[in-house]
Image: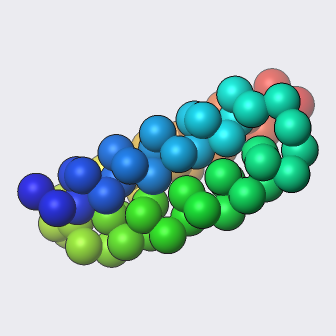
Amino acid sequence: MAHCILFLLGLITLWTGIRTADEVHRLALASAAVFPLGWGYFSSPLLFQCLSGILIIGVYQIYISYS
């Protein structure tokens, strides 16, 4: 359950950083989101890690095809 809380905290921090207009605060919040996202990801079960890895690769492929 702790991995869900950490992952959610990292996503909220990243979302707040994206919505911020000031570049310095955006960079600070994005770099601050790395720790809870990473900690939540690495403490999660293996199935969640595999599924999120597949999801990230799929989103990346869609992003590359549109650019």
Q: Please tell me whether residue 10 is drawn above or below residue 21 in the rendered image.
A: below
Q: Nearer the viewer, residue 58 or 16?
A: 16
Q: What colouring method underlies this structural image?
A: rainbow
Q: What residue is at 17 percent from the left and 61 percent from the top?
A: 2
Q: Residue 13, percent across and down?
A: 53, 45
Instruction: State which quarter of the image contains the C terminus.
Output: top right
Q: Nearer the viewer, residue 48 or 65?
A: 48
Answer left or right for 53 relative to 5: right
* Observer able to see residue 49: no
Q: Please tell me whether residue 20 is drawn above or below residue 53 in the rendered image.
A: above
Answer left or right for 44 relative to 50: left
Q: What residue is at 57 percent from the left and 35 percent from the top?
A: 15
Q: Nearer the viewer, residue 67 or 13?
A: 13
Q: Residue 20, percent across and down?
A: 74, 32
Instruction: State which quarter of the image contains the N terminus.
Output: bottom left
Q: Please tell me whether residue 46 is drawn above or below residue 52 in the rendered image.
A: below
